[in-house]
Amino acid sequence: MLPFFTADFGNAASRSHAFGWAADAAVEAARQQVALLIGATPKEIVFTSGATESNNLALFGVMQAAGATKRHLVISAIEHASVLETAAALSSAGFEVSTVGVPSDGVVRVSDVEAVLRPDTALVSIMAANNEIGTLAPLEAIGELCRGRGVYFHTDAAQAAGKIEIDVQRQHLDLVSLTAHKLYGPKGVGALYVRRRDPRVRLTPRSFGGGHERGFRSGTLPVPLIVGFGRACQLAAEVMPEEAARLLSLRTRLLSGLAGSLPGLVVHGDLERRLPGNLNVSFGELEAEPLLLSLRDFALSSGAACASATLSPSHVLRALGVPKELIHGSLRFGLGRGLTEDDIDLVVLRVVAAVSKLRDLLA
Ligand SMILES: *Cc1c(COP(=O)(O)O)cnc(C)c1O
């Protein structure tokens, strides 16, 4: 990324000089790297500022382009705020939104999606992997259902891309949201995959101007961020199989370490259909806040990172039917690249000590 902040400072949209061509070449190389990660072609990748913008563009863009006879949108109850809030805004604007619930395992069922489809459904948006509990959606089956009904299928793959396989062909995906920083790239850049054929997605832009990114997203491209995003996608694809297996074994070690010393531990969400690097647990009725205070040297959180400033109980755990006392005590462990068995053993030791101490105080 560094040369593109300084020496190679060309604007990728400048067609009249070599500085612009070099920047454009770097952007196109990155576009190819991003496309490869999800089995897409480079022309189908629209660079954005991240998954929030991609989700907004996908939902608003498809619904606005869909026409008067297709006014219905389907989402799930455990979507990220950038999907939930966009759906709420669309609903206020006169579109109809159906929200599919989840059973206590946190996995969306295809039959529940099928049950709410209507002749006027334009779009189904179901996240690939949940950001709080890591549960995975049956993308291929939902994609097949949507394709058969002539409904576009969008997935928010911010958490899934680079961690588990995302394949726009096999999973019949028409739109996919990505963000670089969830796969070790820079913050402030992401992409929306927009299918070009079989079927071609009709999408109305949200921002207007110079017509960059096939007219879907005007504005000068952040070349250094895009270069970093591309390289991060390439690296993620390279290490994905080993890294997934490694994280799963570390998570198993973490869970057995915690469960072995802390009776009453509850795991939220299905353990099998789940991102390998996610564990979300409660320790009986213990509150998470005082626990987190005594574990401040670990990057742990309760609920979603973006919602941890507020104390509102997780909408994801509520959708699973988790009792309120357990929601307030939920702790989310995110395991990632560079983490070792020693790190896991240390966190187990410290969490067990912190929980035991708090339990003693309250006993
Ligand atoms: C992080 C995240 C987002 C938002 O990504 P930004 O880069 O903050 O825009 C959207 N959806 C999911 C599932 C996420 O985890």
Image (tube, helix red, strand yellow):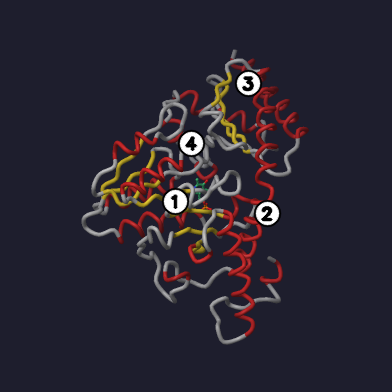
Q: Nearer the viewer, residue 100 or 31?
A: 31
Question: Which residue type does callout 2 highlight?
Answer: Leu
Sequence order check, earlier mark of 4 and 2: 2
**Residue 276, located in which quarter of the rendered image?**
top right
Residue at coordinates 42% horizontally, 63% vertically from top-left? 196
Quarter of the image that includes the N terminus: bottom right
Circles 2 and 3, Cβ within 8 Å, touching? The answer is no
x, y (%) of residue 153?
Answer: 39, 49
User: What residue is disc 4 on?
Assistant: 311
| Residue on which the image places disc 1 | 173
Amino acid type at mark 4: Leu
Mark pair 4, 1: CA separation: 35 Å
Q: Earlier in the sequence, mark 4 or mark 3?
A: 4
Disc 2 crowd rating (10 Å Cα; few below 14, some 14-19, many 20+) is some
Q: Helix or strand or loop: what does disc 3 sit on?
A: helix
| Residue that badge 2 annotates | 235
Give percent across and percent down for residue 31. 57, 64
Where residue 320 sits, quadrant-wise, is top left
The response on whether ligand 1 sits within 8 Å of label 1 is no
Label 3 crowd (10 A; few <14 / some 14-19 / many >=20): some
Contact, mark 3 vs mark 1 (Cβ under 8 Å): no
**In this rendering, the label closer to the viewer, 2 or 3:** 2
First in sequence, mark 4 or 1: give its number.
Answer: 1
Can you identify the residue that label 3 sits on? 358
